[in-house]
Image (cartoon, helix red, strand yellow):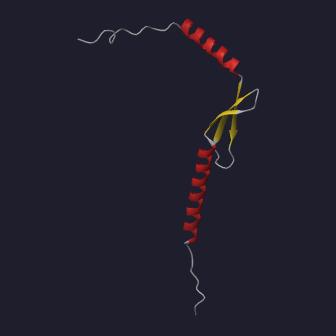
Amino acid sequence: MPPEGKNKPTQAVDAAEISQAVTRINKIIQNIQRDLSFNLDEDSGRTVIRVVDSESGELIRQIPSDEVLAIVTHLRDVQEDLVNRENLGQGLIFSDIT
């Protein structure tokens, strides 16, 4: 026999309740005073999302982080180096020995 409360039917959520919840969430978020910005990191080519405190200008969160952006940039540079090395291997080899 199943334990008490395990097989209770789920209750449908009323559309009005959802609307009220969204309104409350929006009010809370507006009071937080945060700015959201979307930028393009030129080195990595990735979109960067930044959350900044609108009063102090302090960076609250960045997605992806500077560390991740640096890794992406490094991996792209390594990949480009490998492609360039493969292209260098094609062609003629010369020697100054006669």
Which image quarter is the N terminus in?
A: top left
70 relative position to 56: left or right: left
Quarter residue 63 falls in? top right
Residue pictured at 57% horizontal, 75% vertical: 91
92 relative position to 56: left or right: left
Give the camera-side residue of 73 and 60. 60
73 relative position to 35: left or right: left
Looking at the rendered structure, the number of numbered marks drawn on it comes to 0
Residue pictured at 57% horizontal, 79% vertical: 92
Which image quarter is the C terminus in?
A: bottom right
Residue 77 at x, y = what percent?
61, 57
Question: Which residue occupies the extreme left position in the image?
Answer: 1
Above or below residue 89? Residue 49 is: above
Residue 76 at x, y = what percent?
59, 54
Quarter residue 61 falls in? top right
Residue 82 at x, y = what percent?
55, 62
Residue pictured at 67% horizontal, 34% vertical: 50
Give the camera-side residue of 74 and 60. 60
Residue 95 at x, y = what percent?
58, 86
Residue pictured at 59% horizontal, 62% vertical: 81
